[in-house]
Amino acid sequence: MEYEKIIFFRNFFFRAFLIGVAFALFYFIATYVFWDTAVSWATHFFKTDEKELGRLVLMFFVELRIVLVFLFLVPALALHWMARKKR
C-alpha cells in the first residue's frame, strides 16, 4: 500500500473514532439529563420498567464502545504503526 493511502486511511479512522466519541458523550449526557422522561415514555409506550430500560441503555453503551474501539481505533493504530514503519 502506498504511503499516502496509509496516511489517508489512518486519518480517516482516527477522525471517525473521535467523532464517535463525541457522539457517545452526547448520548451519555442526553441520557443522564432526560432519564426520567425516557423512563416514563418507555413505561407508557413499551410497557417496560426502569430496570429493563437501564439494561438496554447499558448494553447500548457497551456495544458502542466495542464498535468505536475495534472498528475505528484499532485500524487507525495499525495504520499508524504501518506508516511509521515505512519511513
Image (cartoon, rainbow, N blue to C red):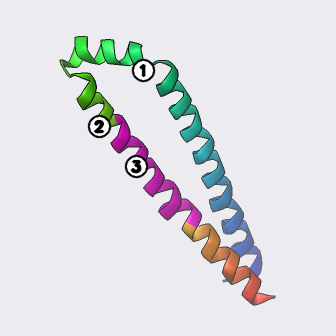
Q: Residue 62 has which mark?
A: 3
Residue farthest along the right direction in this orientation: 87
Residue 29 sits above or below residue 87 on the image? above
Residue type (three-letter) at the residue carrying disc 3:
Val
Residue bearing the label numbered 2: 55
In the shown orientation, is residue 16 left or right of residue 66?
right
Quarter occupied by the N terminus: bottom right
Q: Does the magenta stretch include residue 27?
A: no
In the shown orientation, is residue 46 left or right of residue 15?
left
Q: Residue at position x 58%, y 46% from top?
A: 20
Residue 79: give x, y in percent of width and height: 65, 75
Q: Kindly indicate the quadrant of the structure image that contains residue 39.
A: top left
Residue type (three-letter) at the residue carrying disc 2:
Arg
Tag 1 secondary structure: helix
Residue 44: give x, y in percent of width and height: 24, 11
Q: Residue at position x 81%, y 88% from top?
A: 87
Residue 76: give x, y in percent of width and height: 63, 68
Magenta stretch: dominant secondary structure: helix
Alpha carbon distance from label 3 to label 2: 10 Å
What span is colored magenta in the figure? 57-73
Tag 2 secondary structure: helix
Alpha carbon distance from label 2 to label 1: 13 Å
In primary-sequence order, the first of circles 2 and 1 is 1
Residue 75: give x, y in percent of width and height: 57, 70
Q: Residue 35 has which mark?
A: 1
Q: Kindly indicate the quadrant of the structure image that contains residue 41.
A: top left
Residue type (three-letter) at the residue carrying disc 1:
Trp
In primary-sequence order, the first of circles 3 and 2 is 2
